[in-house]
Image (cartoon, coloured by chain):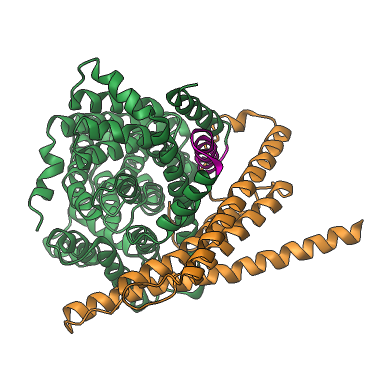
Chain colours: A green, B orange
């Protein structure tokens, strides 16, 4: 049996196990270790297991992940998200659909300090949904905006998936963070435009609130200052070479923790809860990164990526063609799988292909993460939709309402992906200006 | 029979209490990493004197954080899986599948723990130390191996204790992915 065939069979078995509900890390671990044993020997497989566990655990880049997760926890404890949302509401609430726009902007603000789509959707739903319903916003628009806001969670740095992508591909995390800011803010802007158009065409969807005075608007910006300071520390610090991502994360964590202590929102219980949640998320990512690296070794030994590469070259496919093909595959895989699974599942196979076709991995990373976020937003299994539907139950929001509401945002996200593919400069401009 | 059941319950309770103690190492070292890096940055920019060995200290501390993290995630059943098919199976089938998955998790964790333990042992024998502060690298690796071993024991318990409804993955406080 050829090694490529063994690689293909291994990949198929892994997929089967995954769909049977076996935790993803176990699928990749067992198939990877078994595959290395078949293609090499048992001793080699054990060596790979030990080395991968040690390398990932003591990787300085990996340390960035729990620290950024901790920031999100502290931000939630401090209550700064409620204030930011209210401030944004004062600023844009007057516009048609202004409250829905404030939800998107609030999600963008939360994304600047936390790296989780799910957390972003959950927190914004908790903060914004009661007000949206109170102000007679159309439930579909409200639910759609809250689910869509979550997609900014991973795209605007620091995103958990960005860190995982950097670990998987060896792309500079600092560069990836900097590259993501323009696309992240652009997607938020496109959502705002879409809401505005929707509410202009059908004003009953999102009635505008009474106008705020300039004084109130000016005062409200004070409440945005913690988010803005965090953004300056992370973006400015990394962009101008002042901080590494880990340093920026630590400085921000201390800053937000002090802010929460000053505001007397920290209790022993919620502090412990913050650390526990961080540990759970870190452990989940740690396990799948180790197993993904084991699977990558198996994939390399099987020479499956090289065989695929040769096969694709026979079609005279360009780098762009390959990227579009991968995006289509991701769109299909994104229906049943979640963000991290799609990336972990495919990266060991696709990464050598992308390198062979000389595709810019920063650009591809942003595309991949956006595509995966689209999967989080798309019916029928988008995770963000489930969160909004679950939390919206007391307000009479059904799963069907969330599904319908998410469709215009899915279209916007799809257009955004096409724009990113057509204009790679959007992703690469900031990096080219980096010191 | 009842006596054995009660004793098993007590042992499992003690085990989870021990897990909580080990998890505290994770919280403390995670907080430590944040402070260490913060002090390093402050020292570098304010006093023009960065903290000696901050980089390698973070790397060593991460062994402890990562170890505690995987252990705690296993206890809280926080590992990602795809449940679109499994929810369609009968409850009985789901229970059997959960037990099989827990067994496979036990095997995978046990293998990893043993291999990391061997690696730590080789580090100890070779006297592997960090570059700047000359800290012995083996102890944190032993911690990682122990934490992973505790994960395997947790998976072993979960073969028989497959209930998931009573476990809250997210504690009160903030939220993460």
Q: From the top left corner, tell me how far across and down residue B85 is, in percent.
A: 57, 29
**Location of residue A112 with respect to B146 vertically, above or below:** above
Q: From the top left corner, tell me how far across and down residue B76 is, in percent.
A: 58, 55
Q: Nearer the viewer, residue A40 or A177?
A: A40
Q: Residue furthest left?
A: A433
Residue depicted at x 55% and y 55%: B115
The count of marks equals: 0
- Report whether residue B163 is seen: yes
Residue depicted at x 24% and y 28%: A323
Which residues, given as a range, are shown in magenta? Answer: A22-42
Residue B75: quarter of image = bottom right
Residue A252: quarter of image = bottom left
Residue A398 lies left or right of residue B57; in this view the side is right
Predominant SS of the magenta segment: helix
Residue depicted at x 33% and y 23%: A308
**Location of residue A237 with respect to A321 vertically, above or below:** below
Residue depicted at x 46% and y 39%: A386
Q: From the top left corner, tell me how far across and down residue A60 is, in percent.
A: 33, 62
- Report whether residue A257 is seen: no
């Amino acid at each position: 049996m050829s090694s490529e065939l063994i690689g293909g069979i291994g990949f198929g078995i892994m997929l089967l196990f995954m769909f049977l509900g076996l935790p993803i890390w176990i699928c990749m671990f067992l198939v990877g270790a078994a595959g290395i044993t078949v293609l090499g020997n048992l001793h080699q497989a054990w060596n790979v297991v030990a080395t991968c566990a040690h390398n990932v655990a003591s990787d300085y880049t990996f340390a960035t992940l729990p620290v950024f997760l901790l920031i999100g926890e502290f931000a939630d404890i401090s209550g700064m998200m409620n204030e930011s949302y209210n401030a944004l509401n004062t600023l844009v609430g007057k516009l048609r659909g202004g409250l829905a726009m404030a939800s998107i902007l609030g999600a963008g603000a939360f994304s600047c300090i936390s790296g989780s789509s799910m957390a972003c959707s959950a927190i914004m739903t908790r903060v914004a949904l009661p007000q949206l319903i109170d102000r007679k916003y159309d439930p579909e628009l409200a639910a759609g905006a809250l689910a869509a806001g979550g997609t900014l969670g991973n795209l605007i740095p620091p995103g958990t998936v960005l860190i995982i992508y950097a670990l998987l591909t060896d792309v500079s995390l600092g560069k990836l963070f900097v590259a993501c800011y323009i696309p992240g803010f652009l997607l938020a802007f496109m959502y705002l435009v879409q809401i505005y158009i929707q509410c202009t065409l059908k004003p009953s969807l999102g009635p505008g609130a009474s106008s705020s005075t300039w004084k109130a608007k000016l005062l409200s910006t004070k409440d945005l200052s913690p988010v803005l300071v965090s953004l300056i520390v992370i973006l400015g610090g990394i962009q101008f070479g002042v901080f590494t991502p880990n340093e920026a994360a630590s400085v921000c964590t201390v800053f937000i923790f002090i802010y929460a202590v000053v505001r007397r929102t920290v209790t022993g219980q919620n502090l412990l809860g913050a650390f526990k949640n961080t540990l759970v998320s870190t452990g989940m990512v740690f396990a799948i990164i180790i197993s993904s690296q084991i699977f990558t070794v198996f994939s390399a030994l099987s020479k499956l990526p090289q065989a695929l590469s040769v096969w694709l070259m026979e079609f005279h496919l360009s780098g762009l063609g390959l990227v579009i093909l991968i995006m289509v595959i991701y769109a299909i895989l994104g229906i049943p799988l979640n963000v991290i699974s799609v990336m972990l599942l495919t990266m060991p196979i696709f990464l050598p292909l992308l390198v062979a076709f000389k595709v810019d991995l920063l650009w591809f990373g942003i595309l991949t993460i956006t595509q995966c976020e689209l999967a989080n937003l798309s019916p029928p299994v988008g995770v963000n939709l489930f969160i909004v539907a679950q939390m919206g139950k007391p307000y009479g929001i059904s799963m069907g309402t969330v599904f319908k509401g998410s469709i215009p945002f899915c279209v916007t996200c799809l257009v955004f992906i096409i724009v990113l593919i057509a204009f790679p400069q959007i992703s690469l401009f900031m990096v080219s200006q980096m010191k | 029979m009842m006596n054995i059941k009660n004793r098993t319950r007590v042992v499992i309770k003690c085990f989870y209490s021990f897990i909580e103690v080990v998890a505290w190492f994770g919280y403390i070292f995670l907080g430590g990493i944040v402070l260490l890096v913060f002090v390093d940055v402050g020292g570098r920019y304010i006093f023009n004197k960065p903290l000696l060995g901050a980089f390698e200290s973070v790397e060593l501390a991460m062994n402890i954080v990562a170890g505690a993290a995987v252990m705690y995630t296993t206890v809280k059943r926080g590992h990602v899986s795809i449940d679109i098919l499994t929810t369609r199976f009968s409850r009985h089938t789901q229970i059997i599948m959960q037990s099989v998955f827990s067994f496979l998790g036990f095997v995978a964790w046990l293998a990893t723990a043993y291999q990391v333990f061997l690696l730590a042992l080789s580090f100890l024998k070779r006297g592997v130390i960090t570059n700047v502060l000359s800290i012995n690298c083996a102890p944190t690796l032993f911690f990682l191996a122990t934490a992973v071993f505790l994960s395997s024991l947790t998976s072993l318990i979960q073969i028989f204790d497959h209930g998931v409804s009573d476990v809250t993955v997210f504690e009160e406080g903030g939220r993460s992915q």
